Image (cartoon, coloured by chain):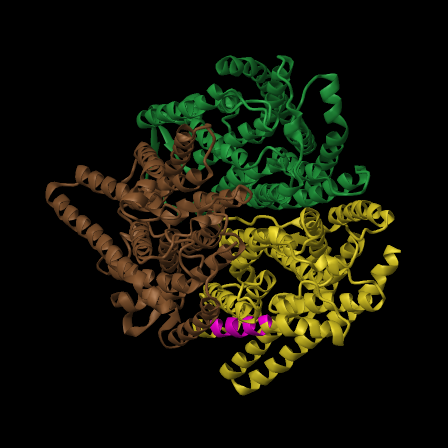
Chain colours: A brown, B yellow, C green
């Protein structure tokens, strides 16, 4: 049977959601407008709209069904994912306007295809963080955690204008989630390991969620890339690179999964995690990848690291650091993300002149450090706060 | 065990389908041509084609899996949905040509992206109507009902050229379906309540159908909107508005569902119905909605009305009016549709000059009245007719 | 219980996959580049990208879930489908470059939207072949078979530049698969009929895979069609034709399925197979189909042939020729493909002048004969080879 939260907690969720939604609408009344006089057929807007639709499917369908391999994450789990994502997107639209004021003149936030895509990517970051605490938190905690995570992520991206480094969302989300999980675990909440049991029957649903993420990942990566005049075809290069990286990633994930299994069977949980690591890594490195084989090598390494990490690091973390990470987001999002970050640094250093290269390296390292510190600090702070809220 | 129709009824379905299909092909031989010399890359045709694909997915995947929460609507239910939709689309292409002759010169019906999208929307109207009678009719009745519904809907839209008011398809379909259900119920057919039982196991499939409708609804609403020279960006405005309205709608639907439930759990059936009401309401009102908060408020109200109606009105209707509405289409499609209609009226009256406004209001009220009367009359007439056919 | 392969076979798969993947990456290092200076917003590239995404969904989601009606094709089946498809695509990119050198100057293979789409179509051909041997082969055999099939198909298309006749992939794949199955059967491997049992519970998953193939088939057919200056609108004509053919096909498949069933029920397996035959047939004939009714008639005939073949030919083949075809690919892909080929021949002969017509007919017949012979010979040769590999 389910562990069961106190009825008071459950009954508080709809009221909190109702209240927040009313506040969101009031904020939208005063601050948000729709961008005017933009024509869908002009200037690649039609394609941006298709990419946005793909990302929308990934957020609601992909993430919603990804975790269905857990026995206790079924209908209400995927339903709850929709609720959280819908609120996170609205909050992200507001945060992008408030925290990045240089982009929005006269205190007005303008809704455009670009701002909608950014909001969905911020929500994705929150959903990644959620993967680490599945089954250990109550719904109200999750909702507050999602909103704090989005705020923190946008804030950590302030100095980069959210544009160039937005794919660090994987690193931020995963570290944030792991820290929240670590704090909650140490605060004495029993890890409900029963919730971690996998369910063979819903395996096909989880496959389904994974495939939706896997298939549309090229849109996820390429959506924020623009074809500049001095670099035509960058967007297509990113799309091809992501496809190839993911194709290699899926082959490696399955091979490692079968090799490390006693009976030589595919491990459902490995598969659903490591197949995606190639997309994460290439997403961070993509603007510097111009040949297919580099993309494939990045996918190869990311998938290998992620699958091995899954087999050997997860239990180690649990015992050595008392840190429990339900969906293993550290191996799926943080490690490949940092790998991609190193690939980007290396590729830029190899191609640029020395003075620009040093400048880039310093900036690049700062961005990662700020992102990582912010996520660790905010994650640690969020754990107890949400606990207080829920008592 | 299943209630079981007489074998004669079952065996008649393939023959009826075969016969109708042959007639359709013969009518296509004489009347239907493909529009020539239209280039896919030009003038937004590529985007229209993407929107058409999205609507196609909604009709066959979304509606097909939406009703799988019913215990007795599984494989054959979704299969049958495909059969009905495929026939309704072909019939709608023919009806659009025969009943709206001003659009087709020289007795030729031209197939274009626009005519295909219109045909899919007409089929959607028939599928809405079907939601009211699930489990109470035999397949042959459903097929005839679908074709009559499409004819009636196109006919009721004649004076508006099917363009501007096509989103009243929700109101027409829902009222039509409820009337058929009312007539059949009063004619003495036992409501097979066993068929209304929900099935937890197929809950994820129903979630899946709902999400497909929910995610692609912006394409559903925006497909018939064109970017005129004097109103550039209207299409994008509709897309953003629908996204926001649906996001609010899903939050409210879940909140109300949890509040009204004794145990504070999400009610699967509420969820699958009320989440979509925001899309219905904004669909009818969309051309007058130019700010995000109005879209969100419409989604808020539609979802609240729909969810409350679901909780309190459905049983009342059953006992007071002896009218049984399996998927509660009245609350999901008719009520939000009429709400959207009022919003459109109000927003236009607030923005236009007085003389045009009065003119618009009269026209607007006439369209709703004609649509409602047509659907009520035709629904009432269709019930007994299909009964005769099936005995 | 499962028949179970020797552990040695299972354990060999990850090593083979790992080795092949490394070889692929090395080949990519030396031979493959990304096409430069192509802009996504120009010249219909955005639409091609959408079509590619649709085909990607068909390959990984559609084919992956299509065979889930088999009791023993569940999670690992769909997972394995992803592995095979991902490797086949990489191999097809290489083969298209090596075997069609006239298209790639200076020994460089350029990755473009077109070459990616071609690679996916070649992978589709391999997945069709696999349908015939499901449940009778071990994973290593399947992997080798997929690579040989892709090589053979590209080779058989050399003289047509892979462009105009690429839709013969259905005929090639099906005949290849059936020959492999025939050889393996005669070599004494017991047909594991237990694996052919259908599973009602996963029926909705299979429906789901079928619908994904069915809904996106227009993109599958139209992706390689270009709008030439002298034939504007050909691409749209193909899209409309495919939609209509599939709509008729689904109606006929259900009718025949219900007629031939004793209880008048829809047969899940019929449905999942014959609904797609209309898309196969119109795909081969499409460039000559310019009116809706011809497309519909082709769908009508293909579906009728396929459904009747399913009912009466499958068992006959098993007893008369000792040939066992698990997913009945002969009826779903080969027969409708050849029907479409005849339709194309007939339509061209009816419209062209006599001298060009004769020239076309000779060429047309040669292409089919070469494709068929190649597939039969290579299929026969592949069976024993993979057997040796696996002992």
The residue segment tinted magenta is B295-307
User: Which quarter of the picture shows residue C200?
Assistant: top right
Residue situated furthest bottom in the rendering: B354
Magenta stretch contains residue B297: yes
Magenta stretch: helix, strand or loop mostly: helix
Residue A144, image x, y percentages? 37, 65
- Please tell me which residue lies in front, B131 or B157: B131
User: Which quarter of the picture shows residue B306?
Assistant: bottom right
Question: Which residue corresponds to the image point at 49% horizontal and 74% vertical from the top-left?
Answer: B297
Question: Which residue corresponds to the image point at 36% horizontal and 45% vertical from the top-left?
Answer: A328
Q: Is residue C269 left or right of residue A96?
A: right
Residue C3, image x, y percentages? 59, 24
Residue situated furthest left in the rendering: A355
- Please tell me which residue lies in front, A162 or B88: A162
Residue A154, image x, y percentages? 29, 61
Q: Is residue C65 left or right of residue A136?
A: right
Q: Is residue A324 left or right of residue B88?
A: left
Residue C154, image x, y percentages? 50, 24
Question: Which residue corresponds to the image point at 63% horizontal and 34% vertical from the top-left?
Answer: C70
Is B208 situated above or below C348?
below
């Amino acid at each position: 049977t389910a562990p069961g939260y106190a009825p008071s907690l459950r009954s508080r969720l709809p009221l909190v959601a109702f209240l927040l939604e009313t506040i969101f609408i009031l904020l939208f009344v005063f601050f948000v407008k729709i961008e005017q006089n933009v024509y869908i057929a002009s200037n690649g807007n039609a394609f941006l709209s298709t990419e946005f639709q793909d990302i929308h499917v990934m957020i609601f369908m992909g993430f919603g069904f990804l975790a269905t391999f857990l026995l206790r994450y079924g209908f209400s789990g995927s339903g709850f994912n929709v609720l959280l994502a819908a609120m996170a997107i609205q909050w992200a639209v507001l945060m992008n306007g408030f925290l990045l004021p240089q982009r929005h003149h006269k205190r007005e936030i303008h809704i455009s295809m670009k701002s909608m895509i950014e909001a969905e990517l911020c929500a994705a970051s929150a959903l990644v963080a959620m993967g680490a605490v599945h089954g250990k938190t109550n719904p109200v905690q999750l909702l507050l955690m999602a909103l704090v995570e989005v705020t923190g992520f946008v804030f950590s991206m302030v100095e980069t204008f959210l544009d160039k480094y937005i794919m660090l969302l994987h690193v931020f989300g995963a570290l944030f989630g792991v820290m929240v999980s670590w704090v909650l675990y140490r605060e004495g909440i029993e890890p409900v390991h029963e919730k971690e049991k996998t369910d063979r029957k819903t395996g096909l649903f989880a496959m389904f969620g994974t495939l939706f993420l896997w298939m549309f990942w090229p849109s996820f990566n390429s959506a924020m890339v623009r074809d500049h005049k001095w670099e035509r075809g960058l967007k297509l290069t990113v799309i091809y690179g992501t496809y190839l990286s993911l194709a290699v990633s899926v082959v490696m994930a399955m091979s490692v999964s079968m090799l490390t299994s006693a009976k030589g069977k595919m491990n459902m949980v490995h598969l659903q995690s490591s197949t995606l690591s190639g997309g994460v890594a290439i997403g961070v490195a993509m603007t510097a990848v111009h040949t297919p084989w580099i993309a494939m090598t990045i996918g190869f390494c990311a998938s290998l690291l992620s699958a091995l990490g899954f087999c050997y690091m997860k239990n180690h973390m649990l015992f050595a650091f008392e840190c429990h990470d339900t969906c293993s987001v550290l191996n799926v999002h943080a490690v490949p993300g940092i790998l991609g970050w190193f690939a980007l640094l290396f590729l830029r250093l190899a191609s640029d002149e020395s003075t620009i290269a040093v400048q880039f390296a310093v900036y690049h390292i700062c961005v990662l450090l700020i992102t990582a510190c912010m996520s660790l600090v905010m994650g640690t702070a969020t754990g107890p706060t949400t606990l207080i809220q829920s008592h």
